[in-house]
Image (spheres, helix red, strand yellow):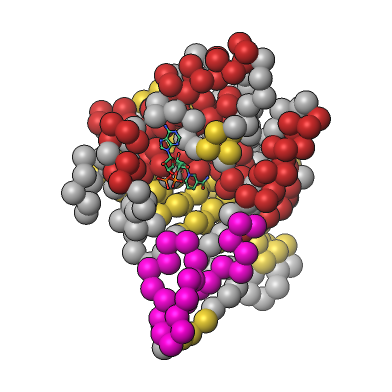
Amino acid sequence: MTTKPLGRNADEARRMLEAVEKAGIFNGYLEDLVYTPKFIKALESVKSGALGRILWAKSRETHPGPHSDWFWDMEQAGGGCILDLGCHCVEIARSYIGKDIKPVEVMCWADTQVKPIEAEDHAIGLVRYENGAIGQFEVSWTFRGGLDLRDEVMGSEGTIWINSFLRTGFEMFTTGKGADYVAEKAESNTGWLFPVGDELNELGYNHMFMDMLNALESGQPPKETFYDGYVVNCILDAAYRSSKSKLWEPVQLDHWRGRVGVTRDSHLTSFDENHYLVKEEITHYGAKKLILKNKKTGKISEQILE
Ligand SMILES: NC(=O)c1ccc[n+]([C@@H]2O[C@H](COP(=O)([O-])OP(=O)(O)OC[C@H]3O[C@@H](n4cnc5c(N)ncnc54)[C@H](O)[C@@H]3O)[C@@H](O)[C@H]2O)c1
């Protein structure tokens, strides 16, 4: 088992994947943030179709920076916040969109805005998938205020917003008397605070190790394997290339085990023989209003149904 990221780059990750598979040994990728109780429940809703077609999945992880020296050294760590935090966000968005849907290309902005380091300390990226869905990551080592972990999922039939850490429903004020540990990467222990009741559980570690150990015992692969870590590294490599070229960069996957040739679903919802439905709404006086598009002429019109 290995924690994230699998490699400093896709080449290292591929070599690790090939080595464990050649040896025929168990491999688990410890990506805890796709095991949080909120994520698991949200993914069940997505899979049951409650959000319809997934159009956009955004994940954000930002905090004031890691705690050990080696993270800040490009050579040892392999990158900055794109690699350290983007790996979580990419796997979260990829899971909502569908791990069998191929990531095609990446556009990424990255900069070193605050810290005296070579690596990027702030980045935003878009990952385009073969079915037209967009994944987005927002990562930073310069964010002030704690550990901000949030997901937003937008589908044709619904929306999910999750705040996994900074707002778990527990708020406390203290003058600082008897101040104690608040939560990972909390920047203050006085004033208004947002403690986390059970960090290990909120961060998914219990569910993750349960899955890993059950899989190990039963001889089945866990939900997250080295293959997932490899795909994540391939996406992040494209992000690094894009941050330099300022262009959409293709995701280079030597091994792709998901579906191929998945076309974009039609966005045309038929209303009747002659019209597509653009939108349906209820007016302030309670009538139903339809916005329609003529299939032949393309003309947009509205109809009020009293
Ligand atoms: N899943 C998560 O949410 C999560 C959270 C934190 C860290 N991580 C990952 O865990 C890894 C470690 O991060 P950390 O914050 O615990 O770092 P850390 O610096 O606190 O700990 C690293 C440990 O590894 C030991 N070590 C270094 N080289 C070694 C070697 N060759 N053999 C044996 N031990 C060695 C060090 O002595 C140290 O105790 C990183 O890959 C990081 O990205 C994952």
Q: Nearer the viewer, residue 31 or 106?
A: 31
Is-magenta flag for residue 54?
Answer: no
Q: Residue at x 49, y 44 (%)?
A: 89
Q: Residue lying furthest right in this view?
A: 218
On-image quarter of the N terminus = top right
Q: Residue at x 67, y 24 (%)?
A: 26
Q: Residue at x 81, y 30 (%)?
A: 218
Q: Residue at x 73, y 31 (%)?
A: 216
On-image quarter of the C terminus = bottom right
Using residue 109 as the reference point, say whether residue 43 is left or right of it.
right
Q: Position of residue 196 (x, y in %)?
A: 56, 68
Q: Position of residue 189 (x, y in %)?
A: 42, 76
**Number of numbered labels in the structure image:** 0
Is-magenta flag for residue 196?
Answer: yes
Q: Which residues are magenta?
A: 176-201
Q: Is residue 216 above or below residue 180?
A: above
Q: Residue lying furthest left in this view?
A: 116
Q: Position of residue 27 (x, y in %)?
A: 63, 26
Q: Residue lying furthest top in this view?
A: 22
Using residue 84 as the reference point, say whether residue 198 is left or right of it.
right
Q: Is residue 128 above or below residue 24?
A: below
**Residue 275 shows up from this direction:** no
Using residue 112 as the reference point, say whether residue 262 is left or right of it.
right
**Residue 14 shows up from this direction:** yes
Overall secondary structure of the magenta stretch? loop
Q: Quadrant of residue 177?
A: bottom left
Q: Position of residue 273 (x, y in %)?
A: 73, 37
Image quarter where ligand 1 lies: top left
Q: Nearer the viewer, residue 210 or 263?
A: 210
Q: Is residue 59 above or below residue 79?
A: below
Using residue 57 as the reference point, say whether residue 217 is left or right of it.
right
